[in-house]
Image: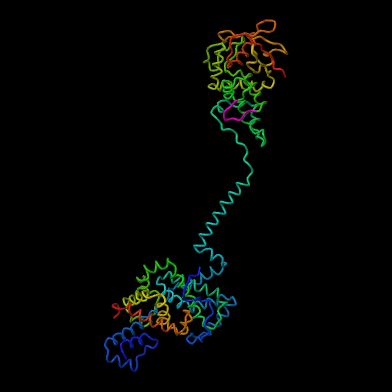
Amino acid sequence: MTCEEFRRRLDGDDPTITGEAAAHLERCADCRRLAERAASTRRALRALREEAPPPFLHARVMAHLRAAALRPRWWNLAVRPAWAGAALVALLLVTVSGYRLAEWLRPAPLPQPPPITASDLQAPAPAGESTVKAAPPAKSSAAPAAPATRHAANGGAVAKHRQTAPRAAAPSAGKFAPAPPALAAQREEAVAASGGAPGAVAADGTIAADATGNAAAAGELRESARLANAAPARPAAMAPQMQAMAATSHIAIACELAGDHGVVARFRLAPGEAPPGAAVWTVTVAADGSLAVRDPAGRDLPAARRPVAVALANTRLAAGTYSLRRVAP
Amino acid sequence: MSAALPYGDVMSPWPSVADAGAPPGDADGALVARARGGEEAAFEALVSRHEAIVYRTCRRLLGDPDDALDATQEAFLRAYRGIARFRGDASFRTWLVGIAINACRSRLASADTRRRRRTESLQPASDERPDAGRALADPAPGPEADALGGELRDRLVAALAAVSPEHREVLVLREIEGLEYAELARAVGVAEGTVKSRLARARAALRAALEGVWP
């Protein structure tokens, strides 16, 4: 027996050494050492069997068994990391698409009111108008009503309107939606009725002073125009007038001022200040801007001078003679 | 998520070779019948009878004690769920060890376990120390275990971890657990002749791994 044959036998399934193998060991020291190492290795391996498992093994196995056996099989699939990751992605997709679907199914949003501007905050809304403002805008074409109404009811906005759109036919522009004709008219009469200026009015029709006591010039058209322009700066003084305007605007009389080439201004006057019936008053504008109002008989009407002057405060009129009459209904 | 393994599936029909080396299986047979009937206590008795060999096998095949515990739990769970498919032409122990080996193969095939094995199994874990492990877990070690010094034991474990998993399987089942060839062949899922030749190569590989570190 060669050393190679002996090693094969040593690694084979019968490790007992008898006969030829024993005779080979007698002669070969290397193979003898090899056989001793093989035997000690086998003993050492068998010794590993004697090592007891951890004492908690049984409890752990049974706990795992009970926990897992109570769960359906799909759960054990689901908790595997790959499946859990896929499930997470799927859940995310479902959530996002569901949200999109909900967005798509949601009814169209109601029209948003215009943003509140600083001028909106300067004067409290008149009591009479608050109900209009609070009413929710309808979904149909009447949607812009709320912004326009607010615009008309607001002192600061009124003054702005007087500056930028003195001609009644031109509605206010800008970010607000154009007001329907009825609302434009309401805004006009609001402007006319309020007088637009914070000054206290004396019996002779001249403007004496504003509520803060700062206003100086009285009776002058230019001064009243200045006060009207400065109105947004004095919201506290304007508020009572705005309330008066709100109370009277529904009975104000639409009037127009016509020159040689046609109508130059439209505005509203209180019933007691407008020409009665079909009467035509004559308005004379002097070179210095002062004006006089006369009835058809040529009598001076000092009481009418002030409201007409205020209504025309922002209208640039050439010196001359104009006729003032009610607008034909 | 079954790993592609060259060994075949433990659930595949067993070769109908007489199970010469099976341990006394009468008690197992009765317990298996009761466990199939849904009796949990019967299955727990089967766990008690075989948990040690399953854990040891997993421990030697995987190296890491935590991995071994996980694989042991997994093997018993698979056995619990598959007990209706257990036909009884092999011993329950053989069948169970085959399941455990498949569980270990799956773990070895995963990259994560492979990484941990590289770093941990070649260094004997703390519970491998005889003074720590034996005092706690092995209150009555046999004379051979006493004779085997801690250092030699660690060298042996390291050499075992160094051989290929295929060789380790047969070494563990034959040299440590003492399974007969027929039972080993069934558990590993190859023919008996293949086991013999594989075992011879495995011994040579172990001898080579012990070269220079074994007296």
- In the image, residue A13 lies in the stretch drawn in magenta: no
In the picture, the quarter occupied by the C terminus of chain B is bottom left
Q: Residue furthest front?
A: A261
B125 sits to left or right of A286 = left
Q: In x, y percent, where is residue B176? A: 40, 81
- In the image, residue A176 lies in the stretch drawn in magenta: yes
Specify the quadrant of the image occupied by residue A92.
Answer: bottom right
> Number of callouts in the render?
0
Q: In x, y percent, where is residue A268? A: 66, 18
Q: In x, y percent, where is residue B5? A: 47, 73
| Depicted B69 relative to depicted A151: above or below | below
| Depicted A75 relative to depicted A125: above or below | below
Q: In x, y percent, where is residue B68? A: 44, 72
Q: Nearer the viewer, residue A49 or A190?
A: A190
Q: Residue furthest top?
A: A298
Q: Report the predominant secondary structure element of the magenta stretch.
A: loop
B143 sits to left or right of A296 = left
A3 sits to left or right of B61 = left
Q: Nearer the viewer, residue B111 or A65?
A: B111
Q: How is the image coloured?
A: rainbow
Q: Which residues are magenta?
A: A172-179
| Depicted A321 relative to depicted A229: above or below | above
Q: Nearer the viewer, residue A264 or A149?
A: A264
B93 sits to left or right of A173 = left
Specify the quadrant of the image occupied by residue A164.
Answer: top right
Q: Residue at x 28, y 92 (%)?
A: A26
